[in-house]
Image (cartoon, rainbow, N blue to C red):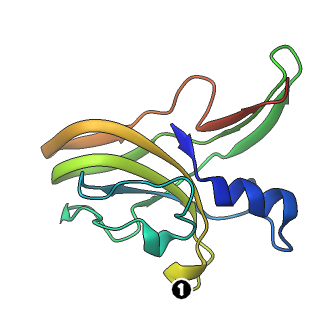
Amino acid sequence: MGWYGLFIERQMEGATKSDFLTGAFNCSLHTATYTPNNDTDDFWNDATNEVTGTNYTTKGVVLGSKTSVYDTATDEWRFDAADAVWTTATIANIRYAVVFEDTAGASSTDPLVSFYDLGAQSVTAANFTVQWDATGIAKIDVT
């Protein structure tokens, strides 16, 4: 998992901040020809080479059951949601899962949040699931 650095900067210094509970967050899938750059990629239009396939739509799936919590035992803030699932999908050349906020505007205004290297994967007429870590999609250790 990697954070997009400009997303974190926007949360700390920007005038427009994301609301993790009420905002619309998506997970999209990308091929190995997209190389995430956590220093320069800032909006969804930078996440190139999105996959195509049966039962896959542009911008992926909407993440449901979102939570934002601070865990005092581990000193971590965590963002989580239900796993991203594509049902009865046929998709080749999957490499990266990209989480972003869908602002319902242009792709050049949808902030990238984080990315995950899934390794080389494909699916044929089956469910494809991006299962988040038990501690959440993304976390910040405040110690």
Q: Is residue 19 visible?
A: no
**Residue at position x 85%, y 57% in the image:** 12
Q: Residue furthest top?
A: 73
Residue 39 in the figure: left or right of residue 77: left
Q: Nearer the viewer, residue 5 or 72?
A: 5
Percent of width and height locating residue 99: 52, 54
Percent of width and height locating residue 100: 55, 60
Relative to 112, does residue 64 appear above or below in the rendering?
above
Q: Residue furthest left?
A: 124
Relative to 108, does residue 139 appear above or below in the rendering?
above
Q: Nearer the viewer, residue 90 or 16?
A: 16
Query: Which of the 4 quarters of the picture holds residue 48?
Result: bottom left
Residue 47 in the figure: left or right of residue 51: right
**Residue at position x 66%, y 60% in the image:** 6
Q: Is residue 80 visible?
A: yes
Query: Which of the 4 quarters of the picture holds residue 49?
Result: bottom left
Percent of width and height locating residue 43: 55, 70
Q: Nearer the viewer, residue 107 or 126?
A: 107
Relative to 50, does residue 96 appear above or below in the rendering?
above
What amino acid does circle 1 point to?
Ala
**Residue at position x 20%, y 65% in the image:** 52
Q: Residues within 10 Å of mark 1 (few under 14, many from 20)?
A: few
Percent of width and height locating residue 23: 70, 64
**Residue at position x 58%, y 66% in the image:** 42
Residue 72 in the figure: left or right of residue 114: right
> Label 1: which residue?
106
Q: How many marks?
A: 1
